[in-house]
Image (cartoon, rainbow, N blue to C red):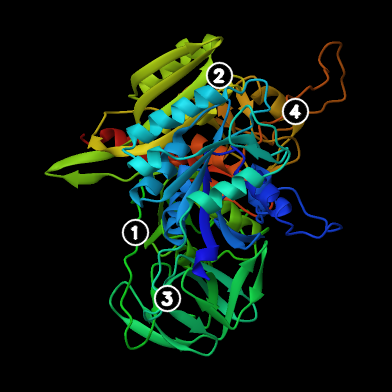
């Protein structure tokens, strides 16, 4: 039976077409009925994934092609969610690398491919989107080979088969001279090139828990590939934890993937990817095994987090108006649930019971957690991201990242100047028509707020990607924000009359008739210092009217930031106030007099 199974992961950079390709594979394999209505990008089940157009959580699907069951894992394409990729690779025997024919391999392509090469997985390469006007599949082919050499791929990995096609239009072919209108060539290549699971059918049962799910009827579900033996519903198994402790439980339900859903199974054997219920205490990285002959399986090491932020109880004047979950206990319980399934995330208590430190790979990973909590009804405060330093042989080191940019030539000078202020070292520069490609090494803290600047300076035309490189010596002082804030001095509702005056000082974040409070940031000051203001001020009315004193008010539309942009924008002394219905920026210390005293004491403190 195991010879008829192929387990494959699909890896690619963000927006190179992974989820669209899975849609077409499911359709070509006859997974859906002829009259079945299937949503576009069916594997993107989270609201956030559909809104952002990226894969955040790894998901499984299965197709039956001729006599072979092909289990497919759709992995995230962003390096911030690399923890998902690292553990999912334990379930597959090969990967399909999807590369955009116009863009070629990007930063996240490099990251995920490196992990697959380290696991010695078989590789299939598909050059996607060859139907685009800007496509250059031959160039993309050569770039993939260069990348395989650079990442020290083995001989069989370097000789990976290449396919060409369009996931959107639903075709794949072995060379550019062919004509095709289906995915037949891709299915054949998967069966030919990806090996059957390397398993021991007659050995005692073992399965590494690579993912977790939840069902309201059966509780926690452990997901993984059976590496040896077989299992039946009702079997007693041991759950071997990473700390050498163990628990025992009975298999209450078992499912295997079928299309986008699951089917109930009574028995499964080595090579199958299964969902097993009955182990409420199972964690990612645990081993489910025979209670008498089981041994813990090795779990691949997860790269450590490089950024941290504080999640705090919302103590502002408007707290509790929107959210259902506002207490420290509720926030802590929710973060604890998150780290059970998100192994690359770390949560630590602080000296204050209302503040928790969350450590992750990047800002986006933490922002997704906060946005998910917000939609669940939580209220909280988020601090500015800070890098995680480490001591090495008596010196303090900070994380550095490889940065790749593609931007218009007319923005190059300003961007280079901004990168220099962020302590970036330019490694390579290439002019291609009206665009410039840059490669640089930059401190992780230098990237905070850079994406927002880059989008504004390039009018949205720039493409940016980055990946953790290594820890190295401190790069020196970096100032990532050159502007101040317009800080409200009063509580009440903003007026058009007051905002008309304030918009001359900078960008506004609020419109008329919005609730404000002292210490709330209502806009960005064009100068570097903070400016106290009164956005609730009204016009003084008299019974005398004079020509020229009355004028119509014309307000610029306020700048509305997403959660990620707000996190990047705030200064170290500021918070983002996150509620189900609102995003507000505020000072950590709301009282203006207390802020001035703190600033004076900080200035007087010896360096």
- Where residue 532 sits in the image (x, y, percent)? 54, 32
Residue under pointer 3: 201
Q: From this viewpoint, is residue 257 visible? A: yes
Is 305 left, or right, of 392 in this rendering?
A: right
Q: Residue at x 49, y 28 (%)?
A: 141
Mark 2 or 1, nearer chain start: 1
Query: Dividing the picture into quarters, in which one does residue 533 lie?
Result: top right
Query: Between marks 2 and 1, how big is the CA–CA gap?
Result: 41 Å
Mark 4 or 2, nearer chain start: 2
- Where residue 335 sits in the image (x, y, percent)? 48, 63
Please tell me the numbered disc located at residue 457: 2
* Crowd around label 4: few <14 · some 14–19 · many ≥20 (10 Å): some
Secondary element type, mark 2: helix
- Where residue 208 sits in the image (x, y, percent)? 41, 70
Query: Between marks 4 and 3, how big is the CA–CA gap?
Result: 77 Å
* Crowd around label 3: few <14 · some 14–19 · many ≥20 (10 Å): some
Is 403 left, or right, of 38 in this rendering?
A: left
Please tell me the numbered disc located at residue 300: 1
């Amino acid at each position: 039976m195991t010879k008829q199974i192929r387990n494959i992961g699909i890896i690619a950079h963000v927006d190179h077409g992974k989820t669209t390709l899975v849609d077409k594979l499911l359709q070509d394999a006859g997974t859906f009925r002829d009259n079945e209505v299937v949503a576009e990008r069916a594997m993107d089940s989270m609201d956030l994934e559909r809104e952002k157009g990226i894969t955040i959580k790894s998901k499984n699907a299965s197709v039956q092609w001729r006599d072979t069951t092909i289990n497919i894992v759709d992995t995230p394409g962003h390096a911030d969610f690399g923890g998902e990729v690292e553990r999912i690779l334990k379930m597959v025997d090969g990967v399909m690398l999807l590369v955009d024919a116009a863009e070629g391999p990007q930063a996240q392509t490099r990251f995920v491919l490196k992990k697959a090469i380290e696991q010695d997985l078989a590789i299939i390469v598909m050059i996607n989107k060859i139907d685009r006007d800007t496509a250059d599949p031959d160039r993309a082919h050569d770039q993939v080979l260069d990348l395989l050499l650079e990442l020290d791929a083995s001989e069989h990995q370097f000789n990976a088969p290449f396919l060409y096609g369009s996931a959107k239009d639903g075709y794949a072919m072995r060379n550019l001279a062919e004509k095709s209108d289906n995915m037949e060539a891709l299915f054949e290549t998967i069966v030919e090139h990806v090996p059957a699971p390397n398993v021991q059918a007659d050995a005692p049962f073992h399965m590494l828990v690579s993912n977790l799910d939840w069902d309201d009827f059966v509780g926690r579900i452990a997901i993984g590939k059976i590496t040896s033996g077989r299992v039946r519903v009702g079997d007693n198994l041991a759950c071997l934890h990473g700390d050498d402790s163990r628990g025992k439980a009975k298999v209450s339900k078992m499912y295997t993937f079928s299309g986008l859903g699951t089917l109930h199974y009574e028995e499964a054997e080595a090579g199958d990817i299964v969902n097993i219920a009955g182990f409420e205490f199972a964690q990612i990285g645990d081993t489910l095994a025979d209670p008498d002959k089981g041994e813990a399986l090795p779990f691949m090491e997860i790269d450590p987090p490089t950024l941290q932020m504080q999640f705090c109880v919302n103590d502002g004047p408007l707290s509790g108006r929107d959210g259902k979950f506002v207490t420290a206990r509720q926030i802590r319980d929710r973060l604890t649930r998150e780290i059970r399934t998100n192994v690359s995330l770390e949560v630590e208590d602080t000296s204050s019971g209302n503040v928790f430190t969350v450590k992750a790979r990047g800002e986006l990973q933490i922002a997704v957690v906060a946005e998910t909590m917000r939609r669940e009804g939580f209220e909280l405060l988020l601090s500015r991201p800070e890098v995680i330093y480490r001591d090495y042989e008596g010196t303090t080191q900070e994380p550095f990242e490889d940065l790749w940019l593609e931007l218009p030539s007319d923005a190059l000078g300003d961007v280079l100047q901004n990168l220099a202020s962020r302590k970036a070292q330019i490694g390579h520069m290439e002019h291609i028509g009206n665009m410039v490609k840059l490669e640089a090494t930059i401190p992780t803290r230098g990237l905070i707020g850079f994406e927002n600047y880059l989008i504004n300076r390039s009018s949205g035309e720039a493409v940016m990607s980055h990946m953790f490189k290594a820890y190295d010596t401190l790069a020196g002082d970096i100032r990532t924000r050159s502007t101040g804030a317009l800080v409200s001095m009063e509580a009440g509702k903003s007026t058009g009359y007051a905002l008309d005056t304030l918009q001359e000082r900078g960008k506004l974040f609020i419109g008329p008739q919005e609730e404000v409070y002292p210490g709330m940031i209502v806009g960005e000051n064009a100068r570097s210092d903070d400016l106290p203001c009164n956005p609730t001020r009204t016009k003084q009315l008299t019974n005398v009217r004079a020509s020229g004193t009355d004028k119509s008010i014309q307000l610029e539309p306020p700048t509305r930031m997403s959660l990620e942009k707000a996190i990047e924008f705030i200064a170290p002394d500021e918070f983002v106030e996150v509620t189900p219905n609102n995003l507000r920026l505020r000072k950590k210390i709301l009282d203006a007099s207390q802020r001035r005293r703190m600033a004076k004491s900080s200035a007087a403190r010896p360096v």
